[in-house]
Amino acid sequence: MNATVATQVASNSSIKANAIKASFPVRRMDFEFNQVPEYWMNGSAGLTHFMTALSALFPDGEKFFVDSVRAVRYHPLLKDNPAMQKEISAFIGQEAMHSKEHVGFNQSANAYGHDVASLERKTNTVIQTFRKGFVKLLKPVGITQEMIDLTATTALEHFTATIASQLLRNEEIQAKMTDETMYRLWMWHAVEENEHKAVVYDVFEAIHGRGIKAYGLRTSTMAIAMVVLLITQSYFAYRLLKQDGQFNAKSLGVIYKYAYSFKHGIITGMLPELVDYFRPGFHPNDHDTNALLARWKEKLGFNTH
Ligand SMILES: [Fe+2]
Ligand SMILES: [Fe+2]
């Protein structure tokens, strides 16, 4: 091939790559949290602090997700797949925007005297402790830092997609989100978690396949990640309630009702989909949320995207 033809071929393939679009958009959001009331969730300290404890996990948690995927995006099995590269870029764009907006909300909770800043720092400590601890333990059997980070992100992305689809389905929880800004923040985030729910899983599968080693890696990581996440989030909720003088039967009662009870609980509602991750052959898109997303995108005015 002479130089002119080679240039032509290269430019044709880059035109082709540019014509490929991600299957979901990156929406630029800029919420204003100044007017958000202290107890924005139905005036309830219990529910507000429960959700704020979740929000404290996001800035560093989602940065970890982005870093884990960035570290492998040019893996030989991915670098020449323009469709996958577009999905990864859009995934990174959405998660970066989620981090930014949750930082904004967390600062507004901090301004009320709730020490979310120290919880954000603790999130980072938990992430770094576990990722570095596991690589020390597993390096001798050939498990690398990149594998641990990507596998943990794959598991946690299923968790976020599942809690997000519960938020989009659970009308009792939605009715408790009485502040319009916070309602839109959580529902926008929930929509996007479901839009990009397969990206990290597909990256994991492209690199590690569907064999017994990949299955063992992803399921054992999920079991550990769930325990760490639920303990950390519960501890954060406890800290916020305690510091606020609201650690009492009333707060614990509403948290139980809306998070853990069989009838209303957002966490208990997640169990079937969470457990499905342990099924050999599982894929995030096995849980069809297209109709749910279409409804919510219309409700939130995202139909232009
Ligand atoms: Fe997110
Ligand atoms: Fe996500």
Image (cartoon, rainbow, N blue to C red):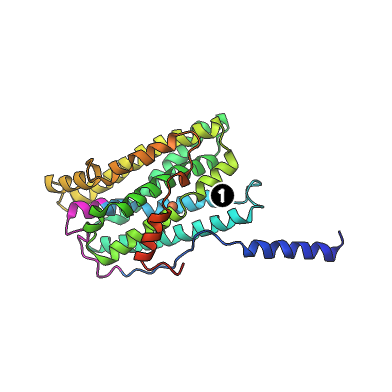
**Which image quarter: residue 88?**
bottom right
Dominant SS type (magenta)? loop
Q: Position of residue 11 (x, y in %)?
A: 73, 65
Magenta extent: 33-50
Q: In which quadrant of the rendered image does the N terminus lie?
A: bottom right
Considering every residue shown, the one lying at the far front of the view is 291
Q: Position of residue 92 (x, y in %)?
A: 50, 57
Residue shown at 67%/62% (left/top)?
Answer: 16
Residue shown at 27%/70% (left/top)?
Answer: 34
Q: Is residue 43 magenta?
A: yes
SS label for mark 1 = loop
Q: Nearer the viewer, residue 295 or 183?
A: 295
Amino acid type at mark 1: Ala
The answer to whether residue 107 shows anywhere in this view is no
Q: Is mark 1 within 8 Å of ligand 2?
A: no
Question: Circle 1 is placed at which residue position?
Answer: 71
**Which image quarter: residue 269?**
top left
Relative to 272, is 81 above or below? below
Considering every residue shown, the one lying at the far left of the view is 249
- How many discs mark residues in the rendered view? 1
Residue shown at 55%/47% (left/top)?
Answer: 203
Badge 1 density bin: few <14, some 14–19, many ≥20, Cα 10 Å: some
Q: Nearer the viewer, residue 239 or 291?
A: 291
